Image (cartoon, helix red, strand yellow):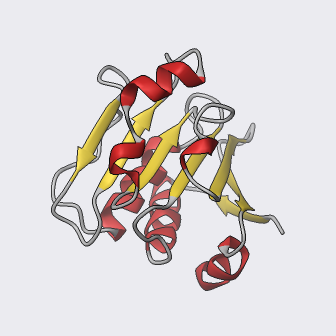
Amino acid sequence: MRRQHLLPTAGDTHALGRALAEVLRPGDLVVLVGPLGAGKTALTQGIGAGLEVREPVTSPTFVIARVHRGGRVPLVHVDAYRLGSVADVDDLDLDASSAESVTVVEWGQGLVEQLADGHLEVRLDRRDDDVRTATLVPHGPDWEQRLQATQ
């Protein structure tokens, strides 16, 4: 079952990320899908705040992946925009840290789903009136139940 959220402000996007962090646990994979400016990094910043990571969560566009430690669960934040294939993802060796971390991948659709048995897909969009929307699409056996806690 898909759940849609209206996000009129960046603060609302951040708050959704914090709410998602409450149900995230080590080994989880979150795949963010959406155009430039839809709120992928803002959502990840909210997730980082909810996981209590200490350093600022910034876009990993130029480094491809950042690991944020010091919170209740490490956060691996990946920008797969410049990755062209599953082989490029394999080269990052993300599965080495995925069991003990929450991994959030921007632009990862079709590239990273094999990293976990199930994952949460978050489809972000920006409407003409600049209101963002987020559609949560669970993939896997327990995501539906876990998402009920974010309502």
Q: Is residue 87 left or right of residue 46?
A: right
Identify whether 121 is placed above or below 149: above
Quadrant in which the N terminus is drawn: bottom right
Q: Can you give x and y, in whole percent of width and height, for residue 16 in the image? A: 53, 66
Q: Quadrant of residue 111?
A: top right
Residue sitting farthest toward the right: 1
How many marks the image carries: the answer is 0
Q: Can you give x and y, in whole percent of width and height, for residue 98 in the image? A: 40, 52
Q: Quadrant of residue 108?
A: top right
Q: Nearer the viewer, residue 37 or 80?
A: 80
Q: Nearer the viewer, residue 38 or 81?
A: 81
Quadrant in which the C terminus is drawn: bottom right
Q: Residue at x 41, y 36 (%)?
A: 78
Q: Is residue 45 left or right of residue 74?
A: right
Q: Nearer the viewer, residue 29 or 86?
A: 86
Residue 151 visible in rendering: no
Q: Is residue 4 left or right of residue 91?
A: right
Identify whether 41 is placed above or below 4: above
Q: Can you give x and y, in whole percent of width and height, for residue 54 in the image? A: 16, 60
Q: Residue at x 59, y 39 (%)?
A: 38
Q: Quadrant of residue 67?
A: top left
Q: Residue at x 59, y 18 (%)?
A: 85
Identify whether 21 is placed above or below 115: below
Residue 146 visible in rendering: yes
Q: Can you give x and y, in whole percent of width and height, for residue 17 in the image? A: 48, 62
